[in-house]
Image (spheres, grey):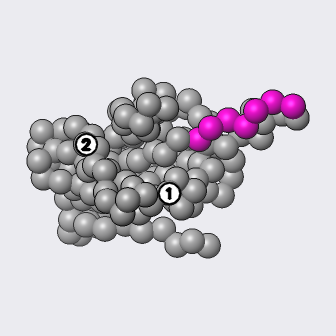
Amino acid sequence: FCPHEYGLMVAAASSDGRVSVLTHQSDNSWAVEYIQDNPLGVNAVSWAPHGAYYDESENAEGSAAAVEYPRLVTGGCDNRIRFWVQQESGQWQEDSSATVSKELSHSDWVRDVAWAPSILPNVNVVASCSEDQTVLIWTQNGRTAEWQPTLLHTFDSPVWRVSWSVT
């Protein structure tokens, strides 16, 4: 489920290569939008915490507060992670400002991704794990900075899940 500030939405990763984003409607029905990720399949999806891209300097006294749109990270069978943002129109598209460094990456299916709770303004952290037996920590220092990977650990077997503690 997404952060409550965006309303009731849930995202589901699928082997057909899509992510389904379901949004609860006032008539108690659910609207669905699809994100076409990659044709090999999507194994994992995680919501960015609300406030992940908050910047106090953009909200100077007298100026309108910047609108923050929902964001997702996905991990798939193409060994990649991707970042997505919902546009003002409501459509989802790959976040072109979230370039991912290619200096280090997974060499097998990404099994899970987890966006860390926001601790510092405009510093975002995502963990990913893979069939390649590694956990990578991806860090972005600033809204348009490149996501930089760091190898956290290489395990003796494939890694299927990652999760952050709230504290």
Where is 160 relative to 108, above or below?
below
Say what amino acid the circle numbered 2 marks. Tyr
Q: Is residue 145 visible?
A: yes
Q: What secondary structure is found at the residue carrying circle 2?
A: strand
**What is the x, y in percent for residue 99?**
43, 30
Badge 2, how many Cα within 10 Å: few under 14, some, many 20+?
some
Q: Which mark is residue 82?
A: none
- Cα distance between the residues tagged 2 and 1: 18 Å
Where is 59 relative to 77, above or below?
above
Identified at 56% across, 30% down, the residue is 144
Q: Which residues are magenta?
A: 62-68
Badge 1, how many Cα within 10 Å: few under 14, some, many 20+?
few
Residue 64, image quadrant: top right
Q: Which residue is mark 1?
A: 7
**What is the x, y in percent for residue 121?**
69, 47
Residue 79, image quadrant: top left
**What is the x, y in percent for residue 143?**
59, 35
Q: Is residue 128 visible?
A: no
Check residue 11 for magenta coloring: no
Q: Which residue is mark 2?
A: 34
Where is 55 relative to 25, above or below?
above
Identified at 24% across, 54% down, the residue is 13
Comparing 86 with 82, the one in front is: 86
Task: Tell me the quarter of the image containing the C terminus.
Answer: bottom right
Check residue 66 for magenta coloring: yes
Say what amino acid the circle numbered 1 marks. Gly
